Amino acid sequence: MEALWQNLRNGGFTFLNAEILSVTPVGPESYHLFGTTKDAEFFFKKYVPKDGAIAEIGTDYGTFYIITGSRTWFTPKIIGFTSKGVNK
Amino acid sequence: MKRSILIWITILFIIPVGLLLAQNTTVTYIEGDPRIKNNRGTIESLDYGAQLATGESVITGKKDLVELDQGNSATIRIKPNTVFTIREIEQGGQKEQVLSTITGSVSMRFNRLAGKEPKIGTVSTIAGIRGTEVTIFAGPDGSSLFIVESGLVSVSAAGQTVELGAQEAVEVPAGGPPGEKFSVIGRELDFSTWSQGKAEELLADPLSSLDRSAALLAQFKAGLEEWVGKYEKARVESEAAAEQMKSMTDKEAQNKYRDEVWFPLALQTGNAILNYRYYTLSALSLRRFVLGPLYMQVRTRNILHQDGSYQEFMNRYQEIIKDFQTTFEPYTNSTDY
């Protein structure tokens, strides 16, 4: 996990000019956004909390889908994210 | 008739349960906050005194340390950032434990006088041991390093075997045979340095790393197909034997048939399941602890600079994952994830 954020930072990546396009509760089919493998399916079933949601974020680098759930104080935790192609 | 079916179902369930209880492994020392992935498929805190069953994994973080004892026959020291699993395989009609270091570093000491010694291994390798103190490194690229302090270790991979004595070591690349053994006298072998070197090699040529993992998956696929074939044959034969047994009217003859014909076939069926599950879980470990992290590294390092070699990597990765889904996923279950 540390390597993931470190690599993104080293690569100069940011959620540039981010805009929240939608927020939807996690449902039985949500894992399809992240892949069709059983790994993706069971990750959602087992490790995404019941209050999980997927935030669709538009940025200058493209659209990202962030899984959120649980909270530290009032802030939801980021559990995972993906993108459908990145604009360079 | 119902009774016969019940016996058949019971036998199928008793075989794995018997395996689970084959060797008690107890947590005798803990530092930090290590976790256990149990046979229900959930991850929980690992407690002092807990019993580790076959199929369960100990997962240590960067400040964790765990020690396990198998009675007076073995002591297993699981170092930081490690995933260690007890698996079981059938070889030559005998069920054997395989103490598997999936990633990270584990040291083991076996007492030669305490009975039969288990196998040890990593994702890519399996090794037989005799009265041994051995340390295993399992690298981020699926490679392994076996370092023998005392006793004998016989390391096999890709159809080749290397015999190691005291103060000898051998490295095994993912998907390949063991390399040349070397002496460790006067050499300090440190897991962090070794693992870091492997990670750098991995990222220097990610496509070759994918190919090595694909070669290893192909070996697992061959093992899986062999044992699924044996399972199907044994299942058909044992079901036919069960039918034959049910049709018998002489109670004594029926019992004799059950003991001499049907029961061995039922055991063969159980053993075949054990072995195809071994190859399936090895493939799943490779996908999770080698391919997954490699994908993450390549994707995040290139998030804003995706050239032709990046696309080539991603295409090859997707091919491997599709093949994994078709070949191995049907033999996994929810508790494996």
Image (cartoon, coloured by chain):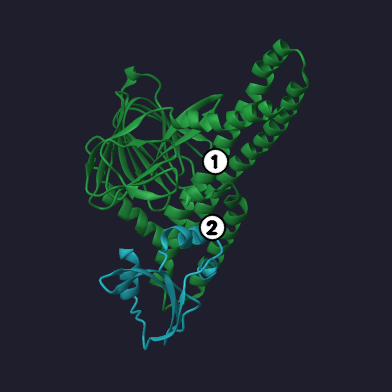
Chain colours: A cyan, B green
Q: Residue B321 occupies which quadrant of the picture?
A: bottom right
Marks 2/1: CA–CA distance: 16 Å
Spot occupied by residue B124 in the image (x, y as percentages of width and height): 46, 43
Secondary element under disc 2, as helix, strand or loop, is helix
Q: Farthest residue in the top direction?
A: B252
**Label 2: how many residues lie within 10 Å, few (<14), some (14-19) or many (20+)?**
some
* Amino acid at the residue labelled 2: Lys
Vertical order, B253 against B316 (above or below): above
Q: Which disc, if any, is residue B277?
A: 1
Residue that badge 2 annotates: A38
Quarter holding the N terminus of chain B? top right
- Residue sitting at x 40%, y 70%: B300
Spot occupied by residue B69 in the image (x, y as percentages of width and height): 29, 31
Vertical order, A23 against B172 (above or below): below
In this view, the residue in front, B172 or A76, is A76
Q: Is residue B312 visible?
A: no
Q: Which disc, if any, is residue A65?
A: none
